[in-house]
């Protein structure tokens, strides 16, 4: 091993800062090649062999997406197993088609080798260096360390604000992602022109998104003068509903009623942060962050509220991975109409039996592993620790109060409804204390209506579910019909008062 | 408390503010306490080891200075036994006992102990040893101030994963400490940002590809999978470790201390000797000064030189981890170094040497060296010798299939960006000079660095690879 030393003393008289113009051109060429080569060579993450869900198909049923499953992996699994009649359209991008040509691959290979050769050639102007200089230790002029750093931070914050707080980036979020769907939903609802009817907004998580059809509800309720709308989205939690409501109803008087399910929010912190990002403001940083149990999550939520880009890391990675595909997907007209056209899943879990005494579940062979898992999950007693349950209850209590506070001076009625529990009743993940809490709210606040806890018990049968938690198309129809009937019945008297004072 | 975690930066901020708000004498004590808190954050029990090693070597240093030649040797042996004894027991006991049990066909459970490897033990043991050996050789005077010595051993930026600092470089910095100049602070900030980018953007993203391959190499057969997986790991380990070193050096600079350079663009090395002058420089220098040179002084001769080289490199391998894969990795590096020396000797003065010295040939040398480093990942990253064998057979086409191209678009882009930056740094110290750049360059550079740190890290805080060594 040869002698080796750092030579700090000689730093200031070292290599000149400016490089030759020939080198600069080579650097620019090198960068251009990087972009070209990276785009053409990269394999789709996480590997080429991954089964991608077919999201569009030709045929009678057109586009068919289940809009709400509890996690990305689960969603992908389900999307991958959707059976659509007709012939699937081959989705080969021009770049992929180009890549499949052998000659192109060879040319790119040669380009890569050439780029590497030029780069390394440029790096080696002479003999092997015998020592390496450390960082500079003296400066010929006065430095403004703190000033430059602070301005750098300010520029960065402004850049983040321009890109991520103005809705610029939210408009190109992956339409199939939770954050993308949330952004799209709230944007569409915000831009929607008032129908002139009595508008009822339903919010909720995947169980409501799968179970409630705004289109079907409209047909059923239009005679009574009601228009039903939904911003229910999978994996969303009550804090996100609050922010979404603030986004779509800034003056807090747009709706006759807002319907909430009585559920425990259980989505993962990272998902919650990215989903809330499109509807957060700078001022939400403390309140939103305080809703998380662990300090690292609170910190992430805090930074996600201020530096919004950090909440979109996964989306940005996916955008850089497939930029052209993203642009194509964002422009798809189906995105806007997908939810209205969605009629629910046709599958059911008929044949599944559950013995509450022994806890034994028997599945018919046709059920997928995912369906079995969700059924088992729905039958499992709540496993959250006492602290966690308390935290969730506290969170729910806080946000319910915030929503009530927001609508306290408004004519909008707040309606709490039970969520569909599962094919065998199962556990609603709602502790007794929690139920008592909802009851207290309804008793104390006369503008809050609480729908009967057992009004959807008739749906607790395998024929109405496509997995352990979510209603299928048949269940969706029944649920929607029952809910609309109940709401129309209860809202008629309230609404006459509301309309008398509200010009809309 | 990882350097890439939120807790560390809160800790660092508090420590730095307190350090600068009190006189240095108190500040030094405060930094020492903070270093012990930092170390105990991993496991409070580890503090016993580091304190024992510190106390023993502190007194041995003083005794060494006063002792006669015969007693000096005895005291040095005591220091070696204590330090290497701790290292050997905690890091290598299970490895050697397990290997011996396998050799004697004994059940492994009868000899294996439940030992937790104390983090950073390899690093602070080497730092501590360098002190007693230097005092023994008379290269430095024994440190009389215990706080100074304890601070040298435990100073938190280098404690867990280096760089390996020497007492004779560092003690004088403690004694002559002055508030860092603006340029030093600026360099520190640039180093920290560059280290965080290396770790969170480059290393963690390449780790996705490398883990995908190395966690189950049999799931990805074929030469293309092996080479792309190996390439991803080779650069992951570089960015990971050099990112850590940059952050450590940057933090030290902000507190007014200098750590030596540890990495100098090893991807641009032209031969194995050049590579070891660029990769983990403080370790290779330590081994050169405290192992290779003393061994070379004992016996002369070309064969002895090669033999010593091999011994040193096998020990380098073993230093990295208690596993036969690391031993083979070290041996492989030894073979490369010896092979290069033999080749160099055979071709000196010939036309071959002339061609190899030309600038146009450099990319071929660099390419060959890079490929040989990628091959070494088959030993370094594989969990077992069987895995190493399987990866090597895949790399050299014995599986008779191409397999998958594992690199993703973003990892390819990152590798090219890294190449571009390495070339710019090699030619003109492009990154280091950012500290001297005018505001019109520095401010956008800061903004871009923050934006990259915000947008491109892989979600979650992942530990540094060299923590396990």
Image: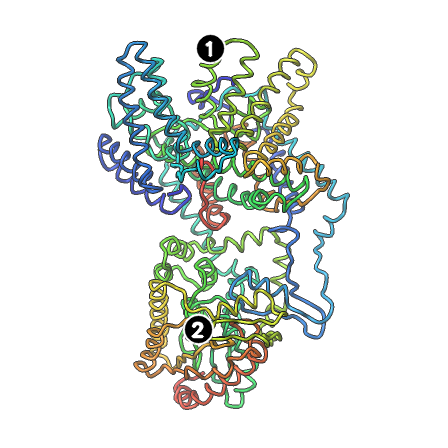
Q: How is the image coloured?
A: rainbow
Q: Residue at x 50, y 61 (%)?
A: A167
Mark 1 Cα-neighbour bin, 10 Å: few <14, some 14–19, many ≥20? few
- Residue A462 appears in view: yes
Identify the element where label 1 is drawn: helix
Residue sitting nearer the eye, B201 or B328: B328
Q: CA distance from mark 1 to mark 2?
A: 77 Å
Q: Is residue A366 left or right of residue A103?
A: left
In this rendered view, identify the residue nearer to me: A474 or B443. Answer: A474
Circle 2 sits on which residue? A427
Residue positioned 35% across, 40% down in the render: A146
Are the residues under badges 1 and 2 in a single subunit?
no
Pick the front one: A363 or B316: A363
Residue A191 visible in this rendered orientation of the protein: no
The quarter in which the C terminus of chain A is drawn is bottom left
Q: Is residue A4 left or right of residue B35?
A: right
Place of residue A431 in the rendered image (x, y in percent of width and height, measured from the top left): 37, 72
Circle 2: is it few (<14), some (14-19), or many (20+) Cα within 10 Å? Answer: some
| Total count of labels | 2
- Label at residue B297: 1
Residue B10 is situated, as x and y percent measured from the top left of the image, at 33, 45
Residue positioned 37% across, 61% down in the render: A283
**Discs 1, 2 touching: Cβ within 8 Å:** no
Can you give x and y, in whole percent of width and height, for residue B246 in the image? Answer: 44, 34
**Residue in view at x 67 percent, y 69 percent:** A83
Q: Which mark is residue A80?
A: none
Q: Nearer the viewer, residue B308 or A332?
A: B308
The image quarter containing residue B348 is top right
Mark 2 secondary-structure assignment:
loop
Measured as percent of width and height from the top left, residue B401 is found at 72, 42
Query: What chain does mark 2 sit on?
Result: A
**Which chain is disc 1 placed on?**
B
């Amino acid at each position: 091993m040869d002698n080796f030393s750092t030579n700090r003393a000689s730093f200031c008289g070292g290599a000149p800062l400016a490089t030759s113009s020939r080198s600069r051109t080579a650097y620019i060429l090198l960068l251009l090649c990087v972009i070209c080569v990276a785009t053409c060579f990269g394999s789709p993450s996480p590997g080429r062999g991954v089964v991608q869900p077919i999201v569009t198909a030709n045929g009678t049923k057109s586009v068919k997406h289940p809009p709400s499953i509890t996690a990305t992996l689960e969603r992908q699994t389900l999307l991958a197993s959707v059976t659509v009649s007709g012939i699937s359209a081959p989705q080969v991008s021009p770049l992929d088609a180009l890549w499949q040509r052998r000659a192109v691959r060879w040319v790119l290979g040669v380009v890569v080798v050439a780029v590497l050769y030029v780069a390394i050639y440029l790096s080696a102007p002479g003999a092997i260096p015998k020592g390496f200089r450390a960082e500079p230790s003296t400066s010929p002029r006065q430095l403004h360390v703190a000033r430059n750093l602070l301005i750098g931070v300010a520029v960065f914050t402004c850049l983040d604000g321009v890109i991520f707080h103005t809705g610029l980036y939210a408009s190109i979020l992956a339409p199939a992602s939770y954050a993308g769907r949330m952004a799209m939903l709230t944007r569409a609802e915000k831009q929607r022109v008032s129908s002139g009817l009595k508008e009822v907004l339903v919010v909720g998580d995947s169980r409501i998104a799968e179970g409630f059809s705004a289109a079907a509800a409209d047909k059923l309720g239009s005679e009574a003068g009601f228009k039903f709308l939904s911003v229910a989205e999978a994996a969303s939690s009550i804090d996100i509903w609050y922010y979404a409501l603030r986004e779509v109803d800034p003056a807090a008087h747009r709706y006759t009623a807002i319907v909430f399910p009585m559920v425990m929010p259980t989505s993962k912190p990272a998902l919650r942060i990215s989903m809330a990002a499109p509807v957060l403001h700078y001022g939400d940083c403390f309140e939103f962050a305080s809703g998380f149990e662990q300090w690292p999550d609170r910190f992430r939520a805090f930074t996600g509220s201020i530096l919004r880009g950090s909440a979109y890391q996964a989306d940005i990675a996916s955008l850089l991975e497939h930029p052209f595909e993203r642009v194509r997907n964002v422009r798809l007209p189906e995105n806007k109409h997908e939810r209205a056209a969605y009629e629910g899943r046709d599958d059911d879990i008929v044949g599944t039996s559950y013995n509450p005494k022994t806890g034994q579940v028997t599945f018919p062979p046709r059920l997928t592993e995912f369906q079995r898992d969700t059924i088992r999950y729905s039958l499992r007693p709540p496993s959250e620790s006492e602290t966690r349950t308390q935290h969730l209850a506290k969170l729910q209590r806080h946000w319910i109060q915030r929503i009530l506070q927001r609508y306290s001076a408004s004519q909008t009625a707040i309606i709490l409804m039970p969520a569909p529990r599962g094919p065998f009743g199962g556990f609603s993940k709602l502790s007794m204390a929690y139920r008592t809490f909802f009851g207290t709210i309804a008793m104390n606040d006369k503008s809050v209506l609480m729908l009967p806890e057992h009004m959807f018990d008739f749906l607790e049968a395998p024929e109405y579910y496509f997995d352990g938690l979510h209603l299928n198309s048949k269940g969706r129809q029944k649920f929607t019909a029952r809910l609309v009937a109940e709401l129309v019945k209860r809202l008629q008297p309230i609404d006459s008062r509301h309309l008398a004072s509200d010009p809309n | 408390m990882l350097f890439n975690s939120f807790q560390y930066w809160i800790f660092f901020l508090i420590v730095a503010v307190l350090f600068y708000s009190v006189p240095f004498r108190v500040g030094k004590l405060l930094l020492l306490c903070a270093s012990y808190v930092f170390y105990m954050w991993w496991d409070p029990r580890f503090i016993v080891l580091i304190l024992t090693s510190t106390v023993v070597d502190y007194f041995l240093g003083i005794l060494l200075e006063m002792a006669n030649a015969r007693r000096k040797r005895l005291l040095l042996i005591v220091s070696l036994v204590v330090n290497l004894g701790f290292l050997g027991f905690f890091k290598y006991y299970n490895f050697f006992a397990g290997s011996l049990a396998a050799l004697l066909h004994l059940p492994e459970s009868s000899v294996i102990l439940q030992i937790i490897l104390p983090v950073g033990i390899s690093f602070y043991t080497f730092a501590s040893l360098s002190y007693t050996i230097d005092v023994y050789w008379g290269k430095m005077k024994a440190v009389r101030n215990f706080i100074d010595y304890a601070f040298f051993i435990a100073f938190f930026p280098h404690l867990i994963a280096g760089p390996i600092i020497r007492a004779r470089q560092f003690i004088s910095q403690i004694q002559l400490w002055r508030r860092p100049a603006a340029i030093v602070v600026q360099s520190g900030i640039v180093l920290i940002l560059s280290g965080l980018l290396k770790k969170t953007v480059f290393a963690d993203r390449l780790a996705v590809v490398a883990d995908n391959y190395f966690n189950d190499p049999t799931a990805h057969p074929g030469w293309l999978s092996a080479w792309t997986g190996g390439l991803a790991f080779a650069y992951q380990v570089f960015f990971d470790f050099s990112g850590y070193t940059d952050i450590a050096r940057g933090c030290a600079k902000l507190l007014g201390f200098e750590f030596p350079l540890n990495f100098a663009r090893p991807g641009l090395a032209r031969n194995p000797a050049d590579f070891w002058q660029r990769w983990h420089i403080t370790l290779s220098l330590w081994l050169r000064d405290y192992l290779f040179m003393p061994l070379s002084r004992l016996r002369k001769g070309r064969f002895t030189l090669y033999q010593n080289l091999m011994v040193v490199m096998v020990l380098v391998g073993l230093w990295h981890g208690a596993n036969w894969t690391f031993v083979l990795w070290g041996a492989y590096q030894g073979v490369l170094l010896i092979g290069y020396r033999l080749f160099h000797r055979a071709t000196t003065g010939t036309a071959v040497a002339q061609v190899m010295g030309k600038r146009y040939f450099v990319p071929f040398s660099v390419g060959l060296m890079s490929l040989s480093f990628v091959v070494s990942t088959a030993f370094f990253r594989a969990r077992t010798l069987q895995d190493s064998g399987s990866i090597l057979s895949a790399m050299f086409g014995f599986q008779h299939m191409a397999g998958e191209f594992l690199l993703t678009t973003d990892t390819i882009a990152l590798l090219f960006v890294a190449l571009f930056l390495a070339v710019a740094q090699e030619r003109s110290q492009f990154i280091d000079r950012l500290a001297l750049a005018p505001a019109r360059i520095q401010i956008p550079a800061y903004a871009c660095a923050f934006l990259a740190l915000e947008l491109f890290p892989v979600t979650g805080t992942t530990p540094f690879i060299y923590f396990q060594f």
